[in-house]
Image (tube, grey):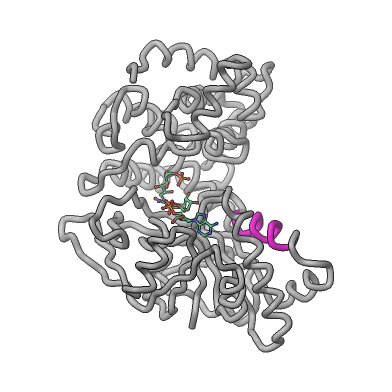
């Protein structure tokens, strides 16, 4: 069996490619990094290091790659694939849609291929659904109708911390031991071959919201506060008791929302949170705050890890003061090498903080959360370590 996986990056090699190889798939990566592609074609294997006391190493074999800048080869691979997965970044999905669309078209023309599942493994709500929209925009009505019968885009949640890598071997990847991949079974076609290690559920929303609004909300809070206080890594940030307290306070807010919305058991959720805080503090990993805080426009957007839980908690009758503080910290993330961070700073300079908050969070100036963000921004600004 063959999987075409878009994105031979950290999570692509460190989690999805590893799991699919162990599940019996030949993994054909698609990437636009010439170095990654040529190395994968040459070596056809790579090493995954588990960041634990034992420092286990896993050799992932049966892999190769296609360059995403060769659309004909990409389309042919999709046409012949048994599965397609992605880990490119939710904002990159529109750039891989053409190759998937042309591959589906070839698959339909050949008439022989079986059902195809396309699973976006991105930190986003409805990643595969968003990818389907991008792909279907590139198919005519007849092809869309035919594709409905043989192609499905089940949404998923993926969880494994994989930092930016610094190895002599550019294919080697060091990952935390923990991993979880949850897929929405309700959107799958009959006869789908289960992937070993995947947790299939009939309702994904509780899982993706619990993951995004616990792991990723806590993570970006640690990153943005760590950046303000001058720490370079999540490990250093999470060694600061004041920051840990703020992360805990934010996760109490998202926890209250998740427990209220989905009826999670409070004790079990508290244990889930405690495990995640321990994962952030893993001494065997070095995770840069500028990775975890990357793309702050995406992270401040209405359906992502800060605004969506804050608005849902507010609607439940609780003021999300700590989530407002995390939003303020995100607005102070002025890392020069992050284009989205620079866009936010330019907007604040050009039109002021109030307008920038509304622009990036879609929260109006009359909303109490908007006022909280301003108050927290002004408090944190006085504390920020000058870079
Ligand atoms: N790293 C983690 O801890 C982690 C964990 C869970 C989920 N995720 C999610 O996984 C996705 C990827 O994150 P990552 O950390 O692996 O990032 P990454 O930058 O390491 O990997 C992304 C890869 O996509 C490639 N790419 C970019 N444009 C492309 C294109 N047009 N066609 C093909 N490949 C393209 C890049 O060259 C890169 O190799 C994101 O949605 C992220 O939120 C990351
Ligand atoms: O990948 P992002 O930019 O959405 O978020 C950064 C990190 O929080 C994220 O990569 C986590 O390491 C990962 O989601 C853990 O499962």
Quadrant location of the C terminus in the rendered image: top left
Task: Left or right? Give the position of 331 relative to 46.
Answer: right
- In this view, the residue in front, 39 or 257, is 39
Q: Is 278 included in the stretch rendered in magenta?
A: no
- Residue 352 lies in what quarter of the image? top right
Q: Is residue 251 visible?
A: no
Q: Residue lying at the far bottom in this picture: please name it.
A: 112
Residue at (60%, 19%) from the top-left corner?
370
Q: Main secondary structure of the magenta part?
A: helix
- In this view, the residue in front, 231 or 29, is 29
- Residue 19 lies in what quarter of the image? bottom left
The image shows residue 286 at horizontal and vertical percentages of 26, 44
The image shows residue 58 at horizontal and vertical percentages of 26, 69
Asked if residue 337 is positioned above or below residue 358 in the image, the reply reads below
Asked if residue 344 is positioned above or below residue 201 in the image, the reply reads above
The image shows residue 20 at horizontal and vertical percentages of 42, 72
Q: Total of numbered circles in the picture?
A: 0
Q: Residue lying at the far right in this picture: please name it.
A: 141
Q: Residue lying at the far left in this picture: please name it.
A: 54
- In this view, the residue in front, 98 or 308, is 98
Q: Is 135 included in the stretch rendered in magenta?
A: yes
Asked if residue 265 is positioned above or below residue 339 in the image, the reply reads below
Task: Left or right? Give the position of 235 relative to 315.
Answer: left
Asked if residue 317 is positioned above or below residue 176 in the image, the reply reads above
The image shows residue 98 at horizontal and vertical percentages of 66, 63
- Residue 46 lies in what quarter of the image? bottom left
Residue at (64%, 84%) from the top-left corner?
114
Residue at (38%, 31%) from the top-left corner?
247
Task: Left or right? Give the position of 131 relative to 83.
Answer: right
Task: Left or right? Give the position of 273 relative to 236.
Answer: right
What are the residue bounds of the magenta stretch? 127-136
Q: Is residue 118 visible?
A: yes
């Amino acid at each position: 069996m063959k999987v075409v996986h878009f994105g031979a990056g950290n999570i692509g090699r460190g989690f999805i490619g590893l799991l699919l190889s162990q599940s019996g798939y030949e993994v054909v990566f698609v990437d636009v990094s010439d170095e990654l592609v040529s190395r994968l074609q040459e070596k056809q294997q790579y090493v995954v290091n588990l960041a634990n006391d034992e420092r286990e190493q896993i050799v992932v074999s049966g892999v190769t790659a296609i360059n995403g800048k060769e659309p004909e080869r990409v389309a042919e691979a999709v046409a012949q694939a048994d599965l397609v997965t992605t880990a490119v970044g939710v904002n990159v999905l529109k750039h891989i849609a053409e190759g998937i669309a042309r591959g589906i078209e070839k698959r339909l023309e050949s008439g022989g291929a079986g059902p195809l599942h396309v699973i976006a493994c991105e930190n986003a709500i409805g990643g595969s659904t968003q990818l389907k929209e991008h792909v279907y925009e590139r198919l005519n009505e007849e092809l869309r109708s035919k594709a409905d019968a043989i192609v499905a885009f089940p949404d998923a949640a993926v969880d494994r911390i994989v930092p930016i890598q610094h190895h002599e071997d550019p294919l080697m990847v060091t990952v935390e031991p923990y991993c979880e991949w949850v897929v929405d079974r309700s959107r799958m076609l009959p006869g789908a071959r289960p992937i070993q290690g995947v947790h299939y559920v009939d309702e994904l929303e509780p899982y993706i919201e619990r993951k995004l609004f616990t792991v990723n909300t806590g993570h970006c809070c640690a990153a943005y506060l760590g950046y303000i206080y001058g720490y370079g890594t999540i490990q250093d940030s999470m060694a600061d008791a004041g920051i840990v307290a703020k992360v805990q306070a934010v996760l109490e807010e998202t926890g209250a929302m998740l427990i209220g919305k989905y009826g999670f058991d409070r004790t079990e959720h508290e244990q889930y949170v405690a495990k995640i805080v321990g994962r952030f503090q893993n001494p065997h990993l070095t995770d840069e705050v500028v990775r975890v805080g990357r793309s702050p426009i995406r992270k401040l957007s209405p359906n992502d890890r800060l605004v969506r839980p804050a608005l849902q908690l507010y609607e439940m009758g609780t003021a999300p003061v700590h989530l407002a503080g995390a939003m303020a910290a995100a607005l102070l993330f002025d890392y020069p090498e992050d284009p989205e961070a620079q866009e936010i700073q330019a907007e604040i300079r050009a039109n002021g903080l109030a307008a920038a908050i509304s622009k990036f969070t879609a929260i109006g100036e009359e909303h109490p959360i908007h006022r909280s963000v301003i108050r927290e921004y002004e408090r944190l600004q006085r504390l920020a370590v000058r870079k």
